[in-house]
Amino acid sequence: MRRGFKAWCERTSSEYRQALGLSLAVSLDPLILAEHLNVRVLMPDEVPGVSPKSLIQLKGSDGLATWSAVTITQGGIRLVILNSGHPSTRQANSLAHELAHIILNHTSDDTQWSPEGVLFRNSFDEEQEDEANWLAACLLLPRQGLLQAYRRQPRPDELARHFGVSQKLVNWRLRMTGITRQARRAAALRAATNR
C-alpha cells in the first residue's frame, strides 16, 4: 500500500464516525454509513427484474461461496447488492468493503452482463481490493476504538459481538494493528515494575 495510506484510513474512519455522531469504540452500522453516502443497499430478492432462476443461483449454495456484494453505479445512482445468505457480520464487512471502494473513488469499468443476464467482472485489481479491505476494517474497527474496547475486554468473541463483526475480522485487525503485541508488552512492563 502507498505510503501514509493506513494512517489516512484511520483518520477517514474517525471523520466518518464523527459525522455520524459515533465514538471510535462503538459499533458502526454500515447501513447508516451507506445512507450518509447516498448509497442504496438491496438484497437480491429486492432487485426488480431478477428472475426466480437467478435468485436461486444467487442465494443457493454456489452463490454463497462465490460472491459477497457488488456495487453498481449508473446515472449517478450507486447501489450495493449484498449476499443475503451470509451472516450479518459478514454482510457488515462486505458492505463496508463496497463503501470503502466508493470513498476511495475506485472505478471498475469492467463490469458486464452476460447474455444470460449474469453480472460479472473481467478483471481484478488487487491493489484496489487491498485498499478497500484495509479501509473497511478501519471503518468497522478503528484502531483507537478497538484498543479501548480491548483494554476493557480482550476476548475476540466479545469484541466481535460488541462491534457487530466477525471474530475472524477482529483477530485480523488485532494482529495487523499490533494491539495484542502492545498489550503483551504493557502487561510485561507492569509485571516487571510490580516485583
Image (spheres, rainbow, N blue to C red):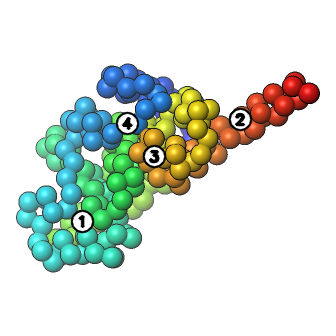
Amino acid at circle 1: Leu
| Mark 2 and mark 3 residues within 8 Å of each other at the beta carbon | no
Mark closer to the chain start, 1 or 4: 4
Considering the numbered disc 1 on the image, is that residue within a helix, a strand or a loop? strand
Residue tagged 3: 161
Residue tagged 1: 119
Left or right: 16 as drawn, with respect to 38: right
Amino acid at circle 2: Ala
Mark closer to the chain start, 1 or 3: 1
Q: Residue at x 42, y 59 (%)?
A: 124
Q: How would you rate the neighbour count of disc 1 (Cα within 10 Å): few for under 14, some for 14-19, many for 20 or more?
A: few
Q: Residue at x 12, y 74 (%)?
A: 52
Q: Nearer the viewer, residue 161 or 126?
A: 161
Left or right: 158 as drawn, with respect to 184: left
Residue tagged 2: 183
Considering the numbered disc 3 on the image, is that residue within a helix, a strand or a loop? helix
Mark closer to the chain start, 4 or 2: 4
Classify residue 59 by image quadrant: bottom left
Asked if one can make out residue 150 in the rendered structure from this viewpoint, the answer is yes
Amino acid at circle 3: Arg
- Picture quarter with the C terminus: top right
Classify residue 123 by image quadrant: bottom left
Provide residue 60's location: percent of width, then percent of height: 28, 75
- Picture quarter with the N terminus: top right
Provide residue 120's location: percent of width, then percent of height: 29, 66
Q: Residue at x 11, y 72 (%)?
A: 51
Provide residue 68's location: percent of width, then percent of height: 35, 60
Amino acid at circle 4: Leu
Between marks 2 and 1 in the image, the one whose residue lies nearer the viewer:
2
Above or below residue 88? Residue 136 is above
Residue tagged 4: 28
Mark closer to the chain start, 2 or 3: 3
